[in-house]
Image (cartoon, coloured by chain):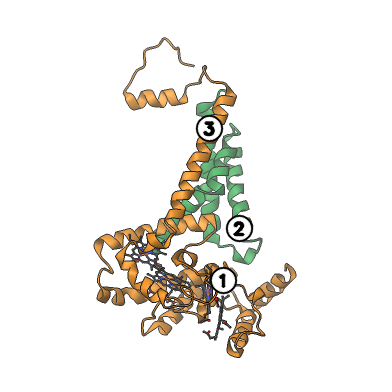
Amino acid sequence: MLGILDLLGTIGGNVLSLPGILGLALGMMTRNWIVAAILGGLVGVFETVVFAGFRFTDIGSFDLAIAVLVGVLAGSLGCAIRHKGATA
Amino acid sequence: MSDPNEKPKGGLIRRLWDGFWSPVAAFSVGFIAIGGFLGGVLFWGAFNWSMELTNTEEFCTGCHTMETNLGEYRETIHYNNHSGVRAICSDCHVPHEWQHKVKAKIIAVKDVYHEIVGTISTPEKYEEHRLAMASLVWKKMKASDSRECRNCHNFEYMDFTIQETRAASEHQRAIDENMTCIDCHQGIAHALPPDYLEEYKRVTDELQANASPESQKTDDVAAVRSYLGNLSN
């Protein structure tokens, strides 16, 4: 029970913070799908490291994986928006 | 680009969708940008504000099931003390950091579910369920190194010379062994179920076992972290 909620909560927290929002914004800046996904993923890594206060022992692999996944998806969505909504 | 004279086709949703993605001729880029910015600010403000509303004591205790805890908490130092500074429910139970806060709020959806099905609707049911709930809270606090306590309390600024001897020596031990507040301060705000010590031990053992090998906090890692902590301060 808590397992699923924990997962959903972590995803929600990421969608509404840096990986989701900055990832989307960066994705919208490029038409290149790969670049968009990488930028999003980098935001995920960046956020996890910064919010763990640069103490690498504090970084959970679960949190990192979710943050990167959300970042990649947000970046790709941003890229899709760019393709659909802009002519340049 | 679509021909403006073309008849709109499809249903309402289809036309809205097409309209949403079609370029605008009537507005300048600046107009759209400023409009979008204002919309964003208003939305974020409203979102944050309503989230803060769910952090008030009135909100938490709006559910009568939470009144047992309210009563117990009212007897403690975090409600009533000589300085008048207090900690409310959300200070201890809801993180400040944005992403942890969103997560806590999403998980709290289960509270609403349990309220509806009446998991803890009577005092008897409450007592029966207390250990399970307390154990959940311990798990979270242990995993977060009692983050919420540390929003207000900090070993760094504790004057061990004016603390009781027992408190000072235990806190020194806590720093040396990298223990966390909840390791010793269970029941700081609520009554404890009788067999809480065994359950607490079970929770910590389980967390220890689940921790991946590299993140397991061995004594060495603890020592290195204390050392690094001292460097950065």
Residue type pointed to by label 2? Phe
Q: Nearer the viewer, mark 3 or mark 1?
A: 3
The residue marked by circle 1 belongs to what chain?
A: B
Q: Which mark is residue B36?
A: 3
Q: Residue at the location (40% across, 11% down)?
A: B6
- Whether labels 3 and 1 share one chain: yes
Is label 2 in contact with label 1 (beta carbons under 8 Å)? no
The residue under label 1 is which amino acid type?
Answer: Pro
In the figure, residue B112 lies in which quadrant?
Answer: bottom left
Q: Is residue A32 left or right of residue B129?
A: right
Which mark is on residue A48?
A: none
Q: Is residue A7 visible?
A: no
How far apart in space, not on screen, are marks 2 and 1 (Cα)?
Answer: 22 Å
**Chain letter, green in picture:** A
> Label 2 neighbourhood size at 10 Å, few (<14), some (14-19), many (20+)?
few
Residue A49 % position (x, y): 63, 57
Q: Is residue A13 left or right of residue B228?
A: left
Residue B213, which numbered label?
A: 1
Q: Colour of chain B?
A: orange
Q: Which residue is mark 2?
A: A51
Front residue of B187/B176: it is: B187
Q: Quadrant of residue B111?
A: bottom left
Query: Picture coordinates of residue B220 (x, y %)?
Result: 66, 77
Residue A56 shows up from this direction: yes
